[in-house]
Amino acid sequence: MLTRNEEDRVSASLGAVRDHIGRMIVVDADSDDRTRELAEEAGAEVFVRPWEGFVSARRHLMSLAESPWILMIDADEVIEPSLWDELEVLGFPDCRADGFQMRRRTVYEGKKLRRVFQPDWKTALVRTDCGYFEDRSVHETLKVNGSLERLRTEILHSSFRSADDQYARIRTYAHLAAHDLASQGKRASFANLWLRPAWRWFTELILQGGIVDGPLGVTMAGRSAYAVHLRYRYLREMNARS
């Protein structure tokens, strides 16, 4: 687990896996709250490391693992307890798969959203010698050299503490994503700035069924569209400077 000022969430996340994990490792990016203290109280080994980006941090985290399997989660995620029974049925760890994915369900304002931000399959459990991360500034994902299977167990994802927190994350991730696009020589067109966000809104709200989640689904679809627009607005600014 990577952490940075997660004192309000880290205990629940670690507590959900503590009794089933041989060793819990937390790499903390200089938190200035009680994150490290609470992680240690939960039984984790905590290593402090200056922040150098998501991929660098996750690769360092993986290098600390000594077991044949790694379960990599974030402090804003809580794995449902059915995971352990499901893995037992599959014969874990002596199984054919090299990695497992679980669906993440967003929890916002105490409500578990059914269709918003779906599908959201996260590769979380992998053989140590098969897992790797590609070079990306944002939305880095754990990749697997080998076979993947999907589990029924879900991850409850309390990604946003509030609307202000969500908008702050949108700005941060949009800037990082724009940097990735600029490094690939991409340009911000009219379609990127306006049509892509409209399509994202329509896709999340209608095609993926976000409207089932009511007013909150409409709100989240709108924020997703805004995130796409902001990404290309930042890219346009970078294009103008180059």
Image (cartoon, rainbow, N blue to C red):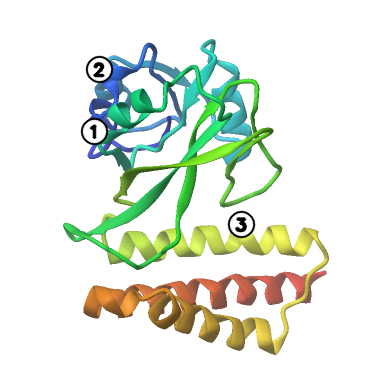
Residue 44 can be seen, yes or no: yes
Disc 3 marks a residue whose amino acid type is Leu
Please tell me whether mark 2 sits on a helix, a strand or a loop. helix
- Give the numbered dot on residue 176: 3
Residue at point 33% right, 45% down?
A: 154
Disc 1 marks a residue whose amino acid type is Pro
Determine crowd level at label 3: few under 14, some 14-19, many 20+ residues with C-alpha closer than 10 A.
some
Q: Earlier in the sequence, mark 2 or mark 3?
A: 2
Q: Quadrant of the C terminus?
A: bottom right
Disc 2 marks a residue whose amino acid type is Asp
Q: CA distance from mark 2 to mark 3?
A: 36 Å
Residue at point 34% right, 75% down?
A: 210
Tell us which disc is closer to us: 2 or 1: 1
Above or below, 119 relative to 133: below
Q: Quadrant of the N terminus?
A: top left
Residue at mark 2: 19
Q: CA distance from mark 2 to mark 1?
A: 11 Å
Residue at mark 1: 81
Please tell me whether mark 1 sits on a helix, a strand or a loop. loop
- Picture coordinates of residue 121, whole percent (x, y): 47, 51
For the image shown, how many numbered marks are present on the structure? 3
Residue 53 can be seen, yes or no: no
- Give the numbered dot on residue 239: none
